[in-house]
């Protein structure tokens, strides 16, 4: 206790000694700030656009060079506001035309962004360096192109700024203008000799930037320069990426996709292993949870209208995925038609349209899984993911498939059945529905390739996190008792033996 009292006493003495020093430093810092603020009154007036106040300060002899804490001068602000008269006045009073703020930004860059009439020309005429680049290597021309400033672009080109200059990401002014949809600037740059086929290290060209952002008119203009509408995005030492049509669909830009079809895009191309029709399914209903949300998209053309247009343009409604996803306990998308994929996402509206357009509902995937198994939820989605459709939607789709004559008592080459699927998704209502439709226990109450029965899956045995579900377990046990089936005390005990039994089965071709 005594030691503690001594420590407190000494701390009090120490604070008493250093307090005057701290106070003096704080006052000095505040005075410094006030002094800096007083010195940059002209810049502050320019920032707020108070031109009358700025005139008063200039007449009183205040400095036009004084900068604010971040290095912004009155000329920076006047250029950003696009005030030609104030810019001229500041230049006449000796304002530094190439002054940089603490981020390296000059008045010319701000003028290129704001596009004030004649300000870029003023600054260039006063000796501003048009060849300087920003922190990311972006040229003044890129900044003006991104902002859609036609007059500024013209002036910078006339000043000798290279039309195909690149930033640190290997992007050009044409790419920036195309991505923002500035058709007039794209036309300007093309007329100035911009390389329409220039690509970044990742294979992105102006066309792909325009397609990704849904800039339909820019896409049309760029294609008029002789570009191959079907060429996929390519880069050194990387597999091919999507072609323009697939990229447009993946981003929900169906009007842009329609324009690409009009320009001759192949409706059945599968540059990354799947086609535009398959992509529509995933865009309409992506996997939930940790998956990406649906794209925002653009235009007035909806996804269903686009599907109809795609088929009218020669799209194969039964096109099968050339190379899809497959793996341990996954649902194999290789060989899937759009119909099977739409069944998997519970998209009854799309299913009905595909049927109207001639889809064959009986075509399975490469593992022999039919639309019934896809709708029932076969395939483990992994941790953090949920099926795109709901349990109620899955039941509605399966009811429709049964009306079309599809057999509910099927198993694919992995031994997966509709009840395996319902167990993966923890859908007890679907289990009850399927049981009521007469599913045969001798088909579904068997282990799949990975050693799992529906009950084992419900107990949490699956790829990724161990995830038992009490409601699904209880439902399956009720069904099994009603069918006279024995319920194992420890369902997971037999997984390894089941796997070995499956591995000993004769291989089929």
Image (cartoon, grey):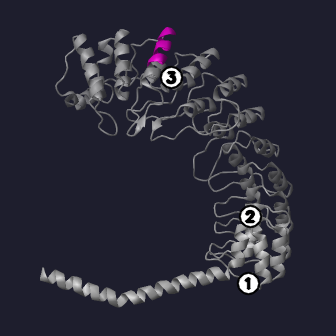
Residue under numbered circle 2: 165
Distance (Cα) linking label 3 and label 2? 49 Å
Residue under numbered circle 3: 343
**183, 238: nearer the viewer:** 183
Q: Position of residue 440 (x, y in %)?
A: 33, 11
Distance (Cα) linking label 3 and label 1? 72 Å
Whether 239 is drawn above or below 440: the answer is below
Q: Quadrant of residue 281?
A: top right
Find the magenta span and give its range. Answer: 395-405
Q: What residue is at 65 percent from the left and 23 percent from the top?
A: 316
**244, 503: nearer the viewer:** 244
Q: Earlier in the sequence, mark 1 or mark 2?
A: 1
Residues at marks 3 and 2 touching, judged by CB atoms closer than 8 Å: no
* Camera sees residue 96: no
Q: Earlier in the sequence, mark 3 or mark 2?
A: 2
Q: Position of residue 379 (x, y in %)?
A: 40, 29
Which numbered tag is attached to residue 63?
Answer: 1
Please identify, in this view, whether the residue under mark 1 or under mark 2 is nearer the observer.
1
């Amino acid at each position: 206790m005594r030691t503690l009292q001594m420590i407190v006493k000494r701390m009090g003495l120490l604070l008493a000694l250093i307090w005057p020093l701290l106070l003096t430093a704080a006052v000095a810092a505040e005075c410094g700030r006030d002094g800096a603020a007083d010195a940059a009154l002209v810049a502050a007036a320019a920032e707020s656009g108070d031109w009358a106040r700025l005139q008063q300060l200039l007449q009183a002899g205040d400095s036009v060079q004084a900068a604010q804490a971040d290095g912004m001068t009155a000329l920076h602000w006047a250029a950003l506001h696009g005030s030609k008269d104030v810019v001229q006045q500041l230049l006449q009073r000796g304002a530094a035309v190439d002054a940089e703020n603490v981020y390296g930004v000059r008045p010319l860059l701000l003028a290129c962004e704001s596009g004030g009439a004649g300000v870029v020309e003023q600054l260039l005429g006063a000796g501003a360096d048009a060849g300087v680049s920003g922190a990311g290597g972006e040229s003044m021309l890129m900044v003006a192109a991104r902002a859609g400033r036609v007059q500024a672009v013209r002036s910078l080109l006339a000043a000798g700024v290279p039309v195909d200059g690149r930033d640190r990401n290997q992007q050009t002014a044409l790419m920036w203008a195309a991505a923002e949809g500035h058709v007039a600037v794209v036309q300007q740059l093309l007329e100035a000799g911009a390389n329409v086929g220039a690509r970044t290290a990742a294979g992105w060209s102006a066309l792909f930037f325009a397609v990704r952002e849904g800039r339909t008119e820019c896409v049309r203009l760029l294609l008029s320069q002789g570009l191959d509408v079907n060429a996929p995005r390519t880069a050194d030492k990387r597999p091919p990426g999507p072609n323009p049509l697939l990229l447009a669909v993946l981003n929900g830009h169906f009007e842009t996709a329609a324009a690409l079809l009009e320009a001759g895009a192949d409706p059945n191309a599968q540059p990354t292993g799947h086609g535009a029709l398959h992509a529509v399914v995933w865009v309409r209903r992506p996997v939930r949870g940790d998956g990406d949300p649906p794209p925002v998209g653009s235009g007035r053309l909806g996804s269903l209208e686009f599907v109809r247009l795609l088929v009218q343009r020669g799209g194969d409604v039964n096109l099968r995925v050339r190379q899809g996803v497959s793996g341990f306990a996954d649902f194999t998308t290789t060989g899937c038609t759009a119909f099977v994929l739409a069944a998997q996402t519970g998209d009854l509206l799309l299913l009905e349209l595909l049927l109207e357009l001639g889809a064959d509902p009986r075509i399975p995937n490469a593992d022999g899984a039919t639309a019934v198994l896809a709708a029932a939820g076969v395939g483990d989605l992994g941790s953090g993911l949920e099926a795109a459709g709901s349990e109620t939607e899955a039941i509605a789709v399966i009811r429709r498939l049964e009306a079309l004559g599809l057999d509910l008592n099927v198993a694919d080459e992995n031994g997966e059945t509709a009840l395996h699927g319902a167990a993966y998704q923890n859908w007890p209502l679907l289990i009850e529905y399927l049981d009521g439709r007469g599913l045969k226990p001798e088909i579904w109450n068997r282990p799949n390739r990975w050693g799992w029965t529906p009950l084992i899956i419900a107990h949490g045995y699956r790829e990724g996190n161990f995830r038992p579900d009490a409601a699904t377990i209880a439902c399956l046990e009720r069904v099994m008792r009603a069918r006279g089936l024995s319920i194992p005390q420890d369902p997971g005990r037999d997984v390894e033996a089941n796997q070995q039994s499956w591995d000993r089965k004769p291989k089929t071709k």
